[in-house]
Amino acid sequence: MSDPAYYTEEGLKKLMDELQHMRTVERPHLSQQIADARDKGDLSENAEYHAAKEDQGLLEARIAKLEKVMANARVIDTSQVDDSRVYIHCKVTVRHMDNDSKRDFVIVAESEADIRAGKISVTSPIGKGLLGKARGEVAEVITPAGTTRFEIIEITR
């Protein structure tokens, strides 16, 4: 069994909607494409048929992966999250120690990450570096660009 992944209700609903769309819209559409291509004759030289079969295999793999994620998904009640340390679903304000800039991050599950919205994955280098830190602590984060130091300014739910 895989480790559980923690989601907000909103994040889990988004995953459920995506899975439902794949099952009810994309899967029947690909089945119809395969049937249409099969009706065109010789399958050994039918590029449309082979492309549709390949697309079907990729879709089934995505569905299986998402089903596995959903089986291990756990919903976090953000009102119950301890805000004395950085944990998943916390909003954390940090100060970049090199240039003194401030930045807000929300630590989320990998599938909910959106850097433009300030949501970073708990498995990202910054997310891993911030986890477990308390206000006033300095997190040294090793990124592809080198080591970056962040001071934890504030932690909220």
Image (cartoon, rainbow, N blue to C red):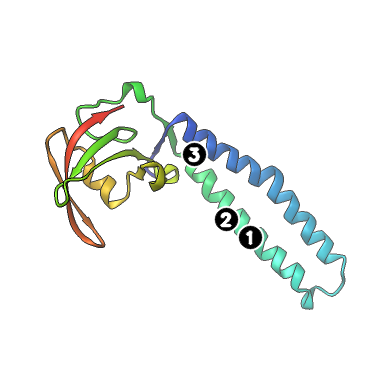
Q: Please tell me which residue is depicted at 38% across the width and 24% down the height of the picture.
A: 77
Q: Residues within 10 Å of mark 3 (few under 14, many from 20)?
A: few
Q: Quadrant of residue 23?
A: top right
Q: Is residue 105 left or right of residue 135?
A: right
- In percent of width and height, residue 14 lies at 53, 37
Mark 1 is on which residue type?
A: Gly
**Numbered badge on residue 71:** 3
| Mark 1 Cα shell of 10 Å, populated few (<14), some (14-19), many (≥20) | few
Taking the spot 43% from the left edge, 31% from the top edge, the residue there is 8
Quadrant of the snapshot with the C terminus:
top left
Spot occupied by residue 90 in the image (x, y as percentages of width and height): 30, 32
**Residue of label 2:** 61
Q: Mark 1 points at which residue?
A: 57
Residue type at mark 3 is Ala
Above or below, 156 against 3 in this view is above
Would residue 74 appear left or right of 16 to someone viewing this image?
A: left
Q: Which amino acid does label 2 sit on?
A: Ala
Disc 1 secondary structure class: helix
Q: In which quarter of the image is the N terminus?
A: top left
Q: What residue is drawn where x is 71% and y is 63%?
A: 52
